[in-house]
Amino acid sequence: MTASAPAMMDRQEFEAALRQIGAERYHSLHPFQIKLQNGELTREQVQAWALNRYYYQANIPVKDSYILARLDTPELRREWRQRIIDHDGEEGQRGGIEKWIALTDGVGLDRDYVVSGRGILPGTRFAVDAYVHFVRERTLLEAIASSLTELFSPNVIGVRTKGMLQHYDFISRETLAYFDKRPVQAKRDSDFALEYCLEHARRPEEQQAVLAALRFKCHVLWAQLDALHFSYVEPGLIPPDAWRPGEALVAVGAAA
């Protein structure tokens, strides 16, 4: 007996289904994330998080460039181009990547080592590379839908930064400057992407593809934290060639 095809959802049902994915699957629920914001990680574990998250941050404008190249109107390109500017920066304005390097500076990691990509966990690399590949190879609708995790990030950012400032004496507001503008940027970007997906998913199979793309992106974020938890928390099995606590350190405040 063949299963019936999913029915077309109305706009409200479709948006509710997207938001339910975040409620169940967003990486704010991951044990490593909870430990991070609750002050339950060591300095070395926070360093591992900052180092590995840099690889994700550095690839965001790469995946956004693939999307930008496929948008067919100046209006859409102007909207999406702002995401690249937010992360790459422009003359006289630090972007998200530079601010993330300031974060790794602040926790005492050597800047050249961070930027080189050496020491990144294999799980981090595979997850991030899979995300870039997904955006490059799937439909434009699916590629845009994969960015919808930003629907769930503004509140999580507030909890994370408050917790880290409260619990870690080696973290300052300057260290976490990356997050200052992200709630506003994420809401702007997710509002656009949500409207695009609600408008352009016009058949049941397109709605299901959008939902699957968002689930995939949640898996990408979750897998990165799985790799960190396995390697640096429990059972603490660090893969060959990955960063080990005590490596590539500089004195806090010594970086340029």
Image (cartoon, grey):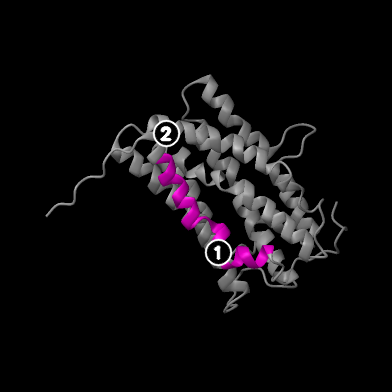
Helix, strand or loop at label 2? It is helix
The 10 Å Cα crowd at callout 1, few under 14, some 14 to 19, many 20 or more, is some
Q: Which residues are magenta?
A: 14-37
Q: Is residue 199 above or below residue 179?
A: above
Residue 234 visible in the picture: yes
Pick out the residue farthest to the left: 1
Find out whether the residues at labels 1 and 2 contact each other: C-beta distance under 8 Å.
Answer: no
* Residue located 48% across and 32% down the image: 195
User: Which circle marks residue 48 in the picture?
Assistant: none
Residue 91, percent across and down? 77, 31
Find disc 2 in the rendering and name its residue. Answer: 198
Q: Residue placed at 74% from the left, 56% from the top?
A: 162
Towards the viewer: 170 or 108: 170
Please say whether residue 107 is visible from this viewpoint.
Answer: no
- Tell which circle, 1 or 2, labels the residue nearer the N-terminal end: 1
**Which amino acid type corresponds to the residue marked 1 in the rendered image?**
His
